[in-house]
Image (cartoon, rainbow, N blue to C red):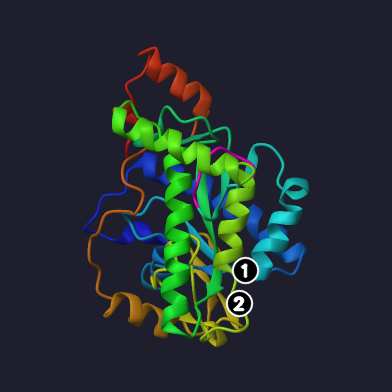
Amino acid sequence: MKSSKSAAFKITKERRDVWKIELQMLEEFKRVCKKYHLKYFAFGGTMLGAIRHKGYIPWDDDIDLAMSRSDYDKLREIADSEFKEPYFFQTDYNDRLFRGHAQLRNSDTTGVMISDINRDYNQGIFIDIFPLDEYPADDKLRKSQQRQLFMIGGTLRNYYRDTNKASEKIRRLLAGIIVWAHGGPSKYFAKYEKIARKYNGCGNGIVGALSVNYGKEVDYMREKGLHKFKEVPFEDTTISMPLTYDEILTQHFGDYMKPSRAPNTHGDVYFSSKIPYKEFIKKVKSKEINANDYTL
């Protein structure tokens, strides 16, 4: 793998094994997008890695992709018929979690966030797929949208919270009352997404992952710059890249060709490319294995 040439960071066999699983998922994702004429592109750290390392940033542990909201909606509609076992196209509609975006999972592997080891949802190794929505032009509307997303998103986070703390249990109980007063988690999340996409086609021409960041201007970019793409090298395959990648990377990272070690965005994750997540969690709880042996 080309990114292994970065001398400052030792890439372990375990990390390579996780990357291999994710690259297989990327190929499956690309197959489906090509079949249905859906456009996607490398996003965040994956965009940076593709340009600077021709693959992963050496200390990264996943792949981030982005799509327009319209293509994302089309993908979600056909996902169940296209992604077959062991792949699972996970969203807030078909699993017990709040993310605000989709994840393509491999159910025969483990990608368990340490804080979520007691949670009941698919926790295979994953790649992230982010829908992009447009910000409103008016500042008051933008702040109102942020407040609404923060309120609903925070309620859903509390609803799925795994905790033994009394104060957090109370918040979870109150969140459950609100969620079910709106018809349940799927319907409440649908309301959340409706708010996120409200200004698509009539906003200020700037898009971002609003449904992930509660409407905050994080990783935002010009919508007009996201219509022309090219394939660039990524490890032993290629990945789609907007022609405006230099503008985007400069805006987000400054001198992006200068490496700067930073932690990944997930926090601590237990990874195994060989043990299915259900079996992994069971063995951790029975103390057959030590979970800390499975961090990268």
Q: Residue at x 41, y 73 (%)?
A: 143
Range of magenta residues: 93-99
The answer to whether the residues at label 2 and label 1 have Cβ atoms under 8 Å apart is: yes
- Say above or below: 275 vs 140: above
Determine crowd level at label 2: few under 14, some 14-19, many 20+ residues with C-alpha closer than 10 A.
some
> Please, what is the three-letter code of the amino acid marked with disc 1?
Arg
Q: Judge from the rendering whether residue 44 lies leftward or rightward of residue 41; answer left or right.
A: left
Determine crowd level at label 1: few under 14, some 14-19, many 20+ residues with C-alpha closer than 10 A.
some
Quadrant the N terminus occupies: bottom left
Per the image, the residue denoted by label 1 is: 69
Residue 134 occupies which quadrant of the picture? bottom right
The foreground one among 87 and 224 is: 224
Q: For the residue labelled by badge 2, is the local secondary structure a helix, a strand or a loop?
A: loop
Per the image, the residue denoted by label 2 is: 200
Q: For the residue labelled by badge 1, is the local secondary structure a helix, a strand or a loop?
A: helix
Quadrant the C terminus occupies: top left
